[in-house]
Amino acid sequence: MMEWNVPFAASLEPEALAALPMAKRIVRRLSDMPGHYSDQEAVKSLLPADPLIYDFWECEYAGTGRGLSFGMTCIYPGVVGSEYHMTKGHYHLNGGDEIYVPVRGQGIILVQTRKGEAQTFNLVPGQFLYVPGHLALRTINTGDEELSVFGIWAPNIEHDYETIARTGFRRRFLRGADGAMIVENRMT
Ligand SMILES: [Fe+2]
């Protein structure tokens, strides 16, 4: 049984989180999210190699009190076609807010309402981002190195990945000659 009832400290580093006894690794390869990218020709050509897009080290609260869950998302640099590596993105079905703390790398957090009203935040080291639980959220790595973001959320959140898989987000992030380009996306 994990020790949620004793205090503990850990470095804000993916390796340190991965080493915690309660950490569960969730691996996302291209084959886990082929429909999330716009360039399906690029998806087809990359699928045999099936690149690792991101790892999520999840520490979901397993105690009996009113604890907190936390985890670290590590998105590896790269593109599918010209679209940057990103998380699937999800809604919280039963609400529950979340705090994001960038640890290393360069990237963007995209949030959106169910009506498709989108907002973009640059992840700035030294700043954190508070996201109310009614918003869908996706993290995008727009840099050349790993993007790691620490998150803290209310426990027992039900994650809805299906809606995003079906509708997508309102914005896409493509690598252009001068850096990241935002492209408006039609939602289905
Ligand atoms: Fe979340």
Image (tube, rainbow, N blue to C red):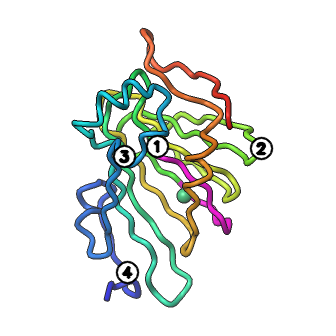
Going 44% across and 82% down the picture, which residue do you hit? 62
Q: Earlier in the sequence, mark 2 or mark 1?
A: 2
Whether 148 is drawn above or below 17: the answer is: above
Percent of width and height locating residue 24 = 32, 68
Give SS at disc 2: loop
Amino acid type, label 2:
Lys
Cα–Cα gap, marks 2 and 1: 31 Å
Give SS at disc 4: loop
Going 34% across and 60% down the picture, which residue do you hit? 26
| Residue 78 quadrant | top left
- Label 4: which residue? 7
Name the mark on residue 110.
none
- Start and end of the magenta stretch? 87-99
Circle 2 or circle 4, nearest the eye: 2
Percent of width and height locating residue 19 = 22, 66
Going 33% across and 76% down the picture, which residue do you hit? 8
- Is 164 part of what is drawn in magenta? no
Q: Earlier in the sequence, mark 3 or mark 4?
A: 4
- Label 3: which residue? 148
Of 51 and 128, nearer the camera is: 51
- Label 2: which residue? 115
Name the quarter showing ligand 1. Answer: bottom right
